[in-house]
Amino acid sequence: MSYNRSPNLCKRILRKMHAKTITEDEFGKAKSFRLFSISRPHMRGFHASWMGFFVAFTSWFSIQPLIPTITKELGLSRVEIARSGIASIGATIFARIGVGPLCDKFGPRRTMSAILILGSIPLALSGLIRSGIGLLIVRLLIGILGATFIPCQFWTSAMFNVKIIGTANAVVGGWGNLGGGFTFLLMPALFELVMICGADEYLSWKIALVIPAALTLGFGILIIWTTDDCPQGHWSERKIPEGTLATLDKGDVEDHDVKDTKEYKKDEEERESERIVVDEGRNPTLDSGGDGTCCKNACATDNCWLYFTVFVLFVQYGLCFGVEIAVNTVMNLYFLYRFKVENCTTTFERHVPLLNLTNITATHLTFSDTNDCSILTQNTASLIASMFGLMNLFARALGGVFSDLLRKFWAIPGRLLAHLVCLVGEGVMLIVFSQMTTIPFAMLVMIVFSLFVQMSEGTTFALVPYLHPRYIGIISGLIGGGGNAGAIIWNTIWVDMVDSDPSRWFWTLGICVLSGSVLTLLIPIQKKRIWGLRCQKQQI
């Protein structure tokens, strides 16, 4: 009896998931959000975008949890490992530059699929690595998977109305980044599973990496046949808005069901107070103070403050998302290097039979000996490191919510304040983390600074839509590139510090983040700075 009811129960659940209709604007974009729906095209595109980014992120960092075993087999130094991490991140910058125009021409669905399929090939061939150079090349090629962030954000932007695009983008970005933490759970589990099946540790890591490669390839093929580029279906059939953004915004926000309510009037007043003045063929006017009594900008031209603001957010995104990517490439190794058994020493003779190497440098020996003295194993270090990335489940979206909350009280200056608070919190917790000498306290502080890191990412992109409505895509791409550029810088610094004092790396990051957060006090957004909190208080 229960067997016969099971199919009917599944049908009822699926029917309810599709039951609630999604309201659309004149261009077919969704004006409502049904998280548990998988209906085409809107929510199917939503889930495909974050899942594609999640799968890509998982594969992108899948080698990292297995680095200790790879190092033992190939006899690599810490510096060689760190350089391979830089290569993995560096490839993403160039890939993202090329992916943007491809999304414009072919749509996000096919672009996402192409990246996933291409990125799965070098990952599946990772078992052929025989040297540090080989590891660097493979991770360089796998790095193209990081470019899936562009079609991920592009996809939701094509599916959702301006009313909810901020929420949609924050959720898909955060859930996609979640793959950076999940891979530290998945890969050690796959590694142990293959060993249980009878393979030795050096064969196990090679087989384990084929599994995420197969999943990435399969998902890249699946989305071609099961999703849509835009509300109209194929990218070539999309409706392209005409006229100025001010006209579109007015059309998008008109909702006759709520037009006469107090809530609508309140939102309309806030929207008018935040609207950018856009002239045909010109950039936003940023040289006046709005009310003429306070919060005036000193810049005499329209462009200079806009360029300065984009540059600052470019730098600050490198101080949050750049830190996240860099930490993902080193956190498990940091716990292995940092927490050692007291009075532990190892010698070369212990490693010669295990590695079966005859020509090995002193640098190689130093690295292998260090892991032998670690309190943690490869698997336990990866398990701890996974908590850093798993905070993306809610932390990035929480940053957007925090920004929205302060906006209700202080408009644009409130968003700037939220951004400043998150960056300062990140910098302070990085410095505190660098001083931790016990694993439990280090884990606790790591979770807190991970929260601030990812909230800072959310507050950054909560500011982006207000910079220039005609060039949101270009500006988003520029600022997003700051994350990868920052990650390369932080990983380069790691190369210099990894053999001497890895803890000092986190201390340096903290100082840099605190210094960069001060720039928030200088930037104007829609003719308003953070100092406008005083003006908003006077108005209230």
Image: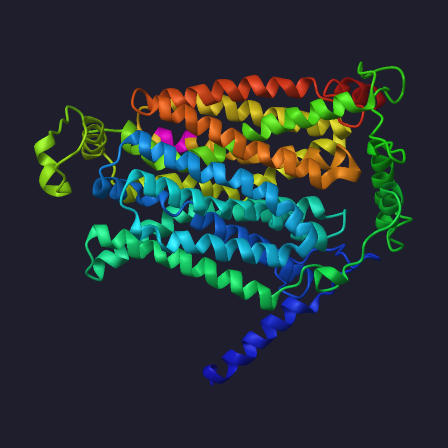
Residue situated in front as seen by the camera: 224 or 400: 224
**Quadrant for the C terminus in the image:** top right
* In the foreground, 125 or 436: 125
Tell me which segment is drawn in magenta.
441-445
Can residue 15 be seen by looking at this rendering? yes
Relative to 279, is 346 on the left or the right? left
| Residue 142 place in picture, x, y as percent | 44, 47
Q: Residue at x 19, y 54 (%)?
A: 200
The image quarter containing residue 9 is bottom right
Task: Find residue 73 and report its horizontal and vertical position in percent.
Answer: 21, 43
Inspect the magenta stretch and tell me whether residue 345 lies in it. Answer: no
- Find out whether residue 444 is within the magenta segment: yes
- Picture layout, residue 330 above or below residue 522: below
Residue 5 percent location from the top left of the image: 52, 81
Taking 73 as reference, is 3 above or below it?
A: below
Image quarter of residue 318: top right
